[in-house]
Amino acid sequence: MLLTTLIVAVCHCLTAVAQQTPPTLEVIQNNNTNTVVPGYIYLTPSGVPFSGPYVFALNGTTVFNGAGKLSGTIHDFQPCVYQKKQRFCAWQGSTAYGYGSGQAVILDDQFRVIKALPGTDYHEFKIVQALDSEGQYSDTAHVTEYRQVRRDLSAFGVVPDDGNTSWVVDCHFRTVDLSTNAVIFEWSSLDHVPLSEGLVRPTGGINGRTKANAWDYFKDGSIVWRLGGKKSDFKLEGFSFDSQHDVRTVSSKGDFLRLSLFDNAYNIFVQPKGLSSGKIIEVNTATKTARLVQQFDSPSREVGNPSGDGGSVQVLPKGNVFIGWGSDAQVTEHTADGRLVYAARFGVSGSSASSYRAFKAPFTGIKK
């Protein structure tokens, strides 16, 4: 009986080990090369064994497996330019209730960290070459940070556990000179957006009663204008969006500004669930109106595809649009008029995968 038990236990362990496989990319649709833009897919699958930064070829082949090369949860893995050289950028740290605590990192071609920006959140890390005071280009980085601070939340019915003042999350955005680490610009949500404008109420894991459960009210220099939300400066003509991610400028000409964004149409704190999509929006700053230029739907739209977290929209050089669907573990590529030309799902069988963002770009390889 003892021997039988041992054999069963060993077999069970071997089966469990065998099931621990890295995430893969399953290609569902891949049109001919005339419509699909060449490149590689950058993902950071989480919620699965061997999570971390990955690069996949369009046929689904894994060309780089970075599991274990960085500690903690990894987000925003993509190629970047630093000191005029091709590098990789990523964020590593811990996450809870929709924000993170960790550091943004720049990695060389051997995947070694050569620059780190501690005390940052994963929602944004972008290197931008900017002109300095002497007319020379220097590397700057846009990063975000979430800080838990004390605030009186009695007006919202919050009674702190310790009998003192309650806790709220202050969303910070700053621009950093990467050569000196000097902060060039900094913005605080509490300085500009009152708590009453929050679309998310203090409840559950963000009830504001403790520092660990600080109320993250801000889910939406000075504010120039607002698009959407409770105090939108623009009339949205025949469309809406909610709980969006990855808002980017596509083009700007005169009074017209085109933006791309991932419309989650849902998050875990706000109901009901909608259908997520990628969107291109044109804003007219003179007439204060906004119209939907193009919407990009998921191939699983007919069964509903709410993505409660993450998501990204990348306009590619030839006009195609590449979309990462966040907590809905898939990536798609569309022509500018919305036609689907590529679709793939990623993850491990039996696990629920997600990738905060996804990118399509060249890949030069990692040196051994």
Image (tube, rainbow, N blue to C red):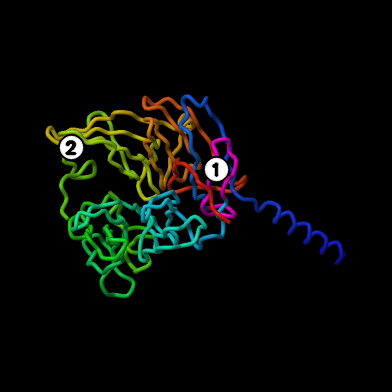
**What residue is pinned by disc 1?**
56
> Image point 37% across, 55% down: which residue?
82
Q: Is residue 255 above or below residue 217?
A: above
Q: Is residue 365 left or right of residue 359?
A: right
Q: Amino acid at mark 1?
A: Phe
Q: Is residue 276 above or below residue 18?
A: above
**What residue is pinned by disc 2?**
234
Q: Amino acid at mark 2?
A: Phe
Question: In which quadrant of the rendered image does the N terminus lie?
Answer: bottom right
Mark 1, Cα crowd under 10 Å, few <14 / some 14-19 / many 20+, is many
Question: In which quadrant of the rendered image does the C terminus lie?
Answer: bottom right
Residue 303 percent coordinates (x, y): 49, 32
Mark 1 and mark 2: Cα distance apart in space: 40 Å
Question: How many marks can you see?
Answer: 2
Q: Nearer the viewer, residue 352 or 280?
A: 280
Magenta span contains residue 58 = yes
Location of residue 62 (image quadrant): top right
